[in-house]
Image (spheres, coloured by chain):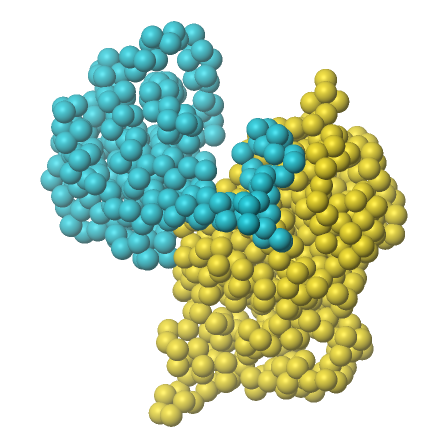
Chain colours: A cyan, B yellow
């Protein structure tokens, strides 16, 4: 039996990412479509359950002259992490002690890199984002605390980390919930005066960071813009509108490559 | 009221009806997250055993949230139909379950009973029912609504065509609509979740739907699922509005978190009815609900997920909606952890909605961080089809590229039609045959590349410029 073709309106499929005109076998999806869908879902599932490779990330950050410290939330096991969001927002006792020992007074930026819902995203894109970010932070003469590499992390774990490190601003790099179209999207959250109890409305977010979404180098530029604006206005969140696009559009492609 | 239950040497005490209901609930992540779940399987059974003996009149007498404090409670109490309730007024919860499964409780008896059943009674009996009970009892409930077609007739199941696009691109949305129509989907509604809240973009989408339905004389309704206040503003400006959509919850505080009140919903309902755009009926409201919404808004008052959800149906039925569906697995694993919990919730929501007289559909769905996959959705869809679900979602390839979750596809709907012999809304079914999309039995025909709908969709760009 010949393989079922796409539907005659397949030419419309270039107008949307939606899975249209995929053909049918009787009432059902053709085999190739079932397998394509299941592959996308498998990638997303693996991304949710993958462990963060902290040693590799620490190596990359050491080359950028950053210190790192490993921390864990109170929900390192994935089943606990998925069931109890609050446990992913609190540090384990041992991690709190480790972080306190690593802290050295105050700093401008605390950075937490956490697995979130996709360790794959962190493995794939965090180092690229950091290598674009760090030189620019240095140009702005910002002091950066030890980078916390966090397992079982929710965004708000950064509030605890940022407070412990005495930071004016906390940057959280975290894996976003995988979709079928991309399982490796990284998100960045920026929070002024981090401390437990901060709400999402008090943060700025850059999302969909991946080569086919927002490229890590561009994301770093947006982040630096937001960091400067947050330090200037002493706030983050809904009151701080991201106008980095206007600033970026004046940059040349060369400048972006260097980032 | 206090409730006591002894199991062997252990004695269990439940301090209130709310606590009893919560601890009698089949296990799910959200009730554990809220700290409301039974601490052991034995305590769960103790609560069920105690709940079984509670008279329905005792449930009626103990509002779970005080009358003075919550307008949903006031609505439930003030609209309770004592005459409709009379046939079951002497029953306990256990007897109510037995009655619902008996042959005495046929379609017309259940229809007469609907307004006598409060959400708390529905939730209580639901907790004593197995999945198969939820299928059989729901299957007997008849709820028929109408706008440009007739939804919920025996032997039918409808489909909402959900053509979402991440940037609301009109050509992209039109491509998905054409896809859905060519697969025979869209009789419940062609309903777009807009990515943007912009009023002008919502208006563009409404006009696009209105033009399409007029151009091909399609006997269905369009909807852009925007906030009710935006819908009101757009109706005032004359935008072509068939249905008014809103997400709702089971407490006044949950609805406040959604930015709505009963008065606001009432105003929108009146306004949409005044437009008289329906041809065979005037049910103009479309509601979405889902277990966990009140908890996530910190507005649950110690009520379990399922009881809160049933209270949302009291809100919904006040407005005689065309469509109501639970978006069951969208909320994530901290509320419904896996395929088993999502299945249970889907059957509960469908049963409680139907029992209370709602045209109940279900968005059979999950997110990638839940312990679920397409096979779980197949099971849920099959069980719901057996239960007589009013409608399900039709998303191209089951992959919603705007909301980033997986629902059911146009193909999935065809599977149900094949497996259960279910038809579409009759007006829509006739239109499909007339357009040579289906044969006289409702089966898809092979299509020619120059089918008018395909040609039309390919012209979308030209028409816009």
Which residue is more in the foreground, B65 or B311? B311
Q: Residue at x 66, y 75 (%)?
A: B137
Quarter of the image with the C terminus of chain B in it = top right
Which residue is situated farthest in the left direction here?
A101
Quarter of the image with the N terminus of chain B in it = bottom right
Q: Is residue B259 above or below residue B74?
A: above
Q: Residue at x 18, y 28 (%)?
A: A61
Q: Is residue B317 left or right of residue B341?
A: right
Q: Is residue A142 above or below residue A207?
A: above
Q: At which x and y percent is residue B4?
A: 47, 85
Q: Is residue B37 left or right of residue B362?
A: left
Q: Is residue B73 above or below residue A229?
A: below
Which residue is situated farthest in the front direction here?
A1
Q: At which x and y percent is residue B377?
A: 52, 58
Q: Is residue A234 left or right of residue A201?
A: left
Q: At which x and y percent is residue B326?
A: 60, 56
Residue B57 appearing in the image: no
Where, by quadrant of the figure, is residue B395 drawn? top right
Q: Residue at x 43, y 60 (%)?
A: B338
Which residue is situated farthest in the bottom direction here?
B8
Q: At which x and y percent is residue A219?
A: 37, 23
Which residue is more in the foreground, A139 or A3? A3
Q: Residue at x 32, y 13 (%)?
A: A257
Where, by quadrant of the figure, is residue B222 drawn? top right
Residue A153 appearing in the image: yes
Q: Is residue B32 above or below residue A225?
A: below
Which residue is more in the foreground, B205 or A247? B205
């Amino acid at each position: 039996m010949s393989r079922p073709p796409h539907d005659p309106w397949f030419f419309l499929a270039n107008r949307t990412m939606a899975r249209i005109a995929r053909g049918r076998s009787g009432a059902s999806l053709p085999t190739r479509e079932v397998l394509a869908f299941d592959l996308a879902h498998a990638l997303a599932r693996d991304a949710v359950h993958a462990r963060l490779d902290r040693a590799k990330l620490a190596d990359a950050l050491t080359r950028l002259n950053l210190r790192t410290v490993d921390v864990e939330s109170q929900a390192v096991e994935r089943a606990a992490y998925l069931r109890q969001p609050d446990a992913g927002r609190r540090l384990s006792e041992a991690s709190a002690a480790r972080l306190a020992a690593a802290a050295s007074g105050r700093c401008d930026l605390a950075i937490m890199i956490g697995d979130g819902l996709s360790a794959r995203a962190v493995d794939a894109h965090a180092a690229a984002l950091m290598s674009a970010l760090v030189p620019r932070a240095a140009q702005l003469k910002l002091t950066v605390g030890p980078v916390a590499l966090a397992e079982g992390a929710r965004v708000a774990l950064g509030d605890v980390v940022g407070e412990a490190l005495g930071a004016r601003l906390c940057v959280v790099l975290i894996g976003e919930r995988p979709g079928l179209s991309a399982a490796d999207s990284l998100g960045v959250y920026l929070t002024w005066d981090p401390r437990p109890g901060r709400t999402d409305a008090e943060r700025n977010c850059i999302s969909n960071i991946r080569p086919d979404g927002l490229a890590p180098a561009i994301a770093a530029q947006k982040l630096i813009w937001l960091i400067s604006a947050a330090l200037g206005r002493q706030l983050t969140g809904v009151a701080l509108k991201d106008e980095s696009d206007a600033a970026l559009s004046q940059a040349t492609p060369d400048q972006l490559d260097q980032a | 009221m206090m409730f006591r239950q002894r199991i062997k040497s252990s004695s269990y005490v439940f301090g209130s009806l709310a606590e009893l209901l919560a601890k009698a609930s089949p296990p799910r992540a959200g009730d554990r997250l809220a700290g409301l779940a039974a601490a052991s399987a034995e305590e769960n059974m103790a609560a069920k055993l105690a709940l079984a003996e509670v008279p329905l009149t005792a449930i009626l007498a103990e509002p779970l949230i005080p009358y003075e404090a919550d307008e949903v409670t006031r609505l439930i109490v003030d609209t309770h139909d004592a005459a409709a309730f009379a046939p079951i007024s002497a029953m306990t919860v256990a007897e109510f379950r037995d009655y619902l499964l008996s042959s005495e409780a046929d379609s017309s008896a259940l229809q007469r009973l609907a307004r006598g059943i409060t959400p708390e009674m529905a939730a209580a009996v639901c907790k004593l029912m197995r999945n198969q009970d939820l299928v059989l009892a729901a299957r007997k409930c008849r709820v028929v609504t109408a706008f440009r077609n007739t939804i919920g007739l025996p032997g039918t199941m409808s489909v909402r065509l959900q053509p979402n696009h991440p940037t609301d691109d009109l050509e992209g949305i039109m491509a998905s609509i054409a896809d859905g129509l060519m697969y025979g989907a869209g009789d419940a509604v062609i309903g777009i979740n807009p990515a943007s809240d912009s009023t002008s973009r919502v208006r563009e989408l409404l006009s696009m739907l209105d033009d399409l339905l007029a151009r091909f004389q399609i006997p269905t309704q369009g909807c852009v699922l925007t906030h009710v206040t935006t819908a009101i503003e757009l109706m005032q400006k004359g935008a072509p509005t068939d249905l008014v959509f809103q997400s709702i919850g089971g407490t006044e505080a949950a609805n406040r978190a959604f930015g709505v009140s009963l008065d606001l919903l009432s105003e929108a309902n009146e306004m949409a009815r005044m437009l008289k755009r329906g041809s065979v009926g005037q049910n103009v409201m479309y509601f979405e609900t889902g277990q966990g919404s009140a908890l996530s808004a910190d507005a649950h008052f110690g009520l379990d997920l399922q009881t809160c959800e049933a209270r949302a149906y009291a809100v919904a039925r006040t407005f005689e909606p065309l469509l109501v569906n639970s978006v069951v697995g969208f909320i994530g694993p901290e509320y419904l952890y896996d395929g088993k919990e999502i299945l249970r919730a889907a059957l509960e929501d469908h049963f409680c909605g139907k029992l209370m007289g709602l045209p109940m559909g279900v968005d059979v769905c999950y997110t990638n961080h839940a312990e679920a996959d397409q096979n779980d959705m197949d099971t849920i869809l099959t069980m719901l089809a057996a239960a007589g679900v009013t409608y399900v979602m039709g998303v191209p390839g089951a992959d919603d590229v705007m909301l980033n979750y997986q629902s059911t596809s146009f193909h999935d709907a065809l599977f149900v039609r094949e497996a259960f012999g279910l038809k579409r809304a009759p007006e829509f079914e006739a239109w499909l045959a007339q357009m040579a999309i289906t044969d006289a039995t409702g089966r898809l025909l092979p299509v020619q590349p120059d089918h008018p709908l395909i040609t039309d969709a390919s012209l979308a760009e030209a028409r816009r410029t």
